[in-house]
Image: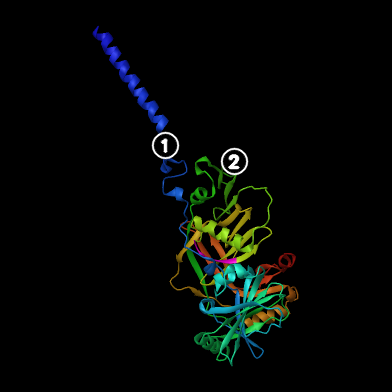
Amino acid sequence: MRMETTKSFLLIILIGVSLLLTFGLWTYQPSEGDASLGDEDTVTGDLGGTEETIKTIVEPQSLVFHSQGEHYGFPSPQLEREFYEEVQRWKMSNFREKQNISGLDPEMEMEFSDALPMTLANILFNLDQPAENLPNWSFNRVLIDYEENSSLLEVTFVSVDQQRQASAVINDASSFELFQSKLIDKEDLIQYIHLSEGAGNVYFPSEVDDMNNYSLSIVPLNEQMLVNSLFRDPTMVSRSLTPLGQPYFSDAVRELKVVDNGRAISFINPNSAEGIPAQRHELLQSSMDSISDHGGWTDDYKLLSIDRRAGIVRYQMFYADYPLFDSGLTRIEQEFKNGTLVGYQRPLFRVTSEIAPDPEPANLDTGEEILTYLRNDKEISLENIEAIRLGYQLTYNDDENANFLSLEAKWYMNYKGSWKPVREENKDAMESN
């Protein structure tokens, strides 16, 4: 009797435990920390970059003054940026489109790397005009002229095809005096060279500011953060290795590959649906929001181009206010289709600090020497040169203990739409590009 009672008691206990386990399974909700792709901190998908806005990410690629047939500019990009930021604060009023297109002979001109919609004008500048009242064409040059008798500055936005213009007025004594000091007294300016044979307005400094070559320490970015941000449901993403041993992530639709020996990523989200291309302003804002959502502004980047038809936005990496050049490691590129991110390429590292306390001074040609070289090199067609500027060639170094970047200062030219070192060894490759 006692044995049967004991058995019955044990059976009741086992049934109770079973019911408790069943109830636990039914009511269990996995937390984010239980996801297969990481703990609660990694699910946020934040690369730790800074906040950027259209006003900080869009800057002119050149800023030049003209006086009595001569051309002047700032000796360093730092001084140029400071002056541009000052111009951005000047209040511009009395905005109007010009019906009679006059000749363009400005005292100062800013040129941007690509066409910008006029709807950005009141974001980039202190323009007293709502966006809905701005014209729907795009500009790539901003001109400033001064009227000495009235102490006014006139700002002109020039369309890409130079067939349309819009103007505004700056009526401020301090702004007028600062502009006049640059134009008349050449305050903080040096002489610039005009490559008259080039395609468009090609200006570059006759002298070279003290530039250094740098060695920069870097840290890798966690590709898992990008997985958490770019995939709809990170818990459904599988991780594998490519034949080269590089990580590959996929949810059977989207894929993210770590490429270039772990130095960059390539994300693809197939979307075959066709639609009307987004406006330039919308495309740029969507791209910037997408990058900001996962803290992607990990270094200093500036807008390079907006390809509205292809839905592609590109950004160039900068250091010490100079652009960095390299195939694949100095640009962020995003592609959108119908408002959806379908392609994304970017470096998978960020700069932390300079390695050497005293950087090595760069030994560069003067602008005059560059002009002579270009005109004497028979393999270079001057009419194919769209711009000339100073920059850095980036080299990614693999070290036993740590990886680092080498930046070598060089003269660069935009040749047939691609940036190349002026003194490039393989000229045949340059001509065929």
- Say which residue appears at 41% left-offset and 30% top-offset: 25
Compared to residue 400, the image places residue 430 above or below, namely below
- Single out the residue that lies furthest toward the bottom: 149
Residue 398 seen anywhere in this rendered image of the structure:
no
379 on left or right of 268? right
Relative to 41, is 12 above or below?
Answer: above
* Residue 334 visible, this angle: yes
Q: What is the number of callouts on the image?
A: 2
- Where residue 354 appears, as percent x and y from the top left, is 46, 68
Identify the residue under disc 2: 252
The CA span between labels 1 and 2 is 25 Å
Label 1 crowding class (10 Å Cα cut-off): few <14, some 14-19, many 20+?
few
Residue nearest the viewer, comparing 245 with 158: 158
Observer-nearest of 318 and 172: 172
Q: Is residue 302 magenta?
A: yes
From the viewer's perspective, is 153 left or right of 12?
right
Count residues near mark 2 (Cα–Cα under 10 Å), then give few for <14, some for 14-19, many for 20+. Answer: few
Tell me the amino acid under the disc marked 1.
Gln
- Residues tagged 1 and 2 counted as in contact (Cβ below 8 A): no
Toward the top, the furthest residue is 1
Query: Which numbered dot is residue 77?
Result: none
Say whether residue 307 is magenta: no
The quadrant in which residue 144 appears is: bottom right
The label shown at residue 29 is: 1
Q: Which residues are magenta?
A: 298-303
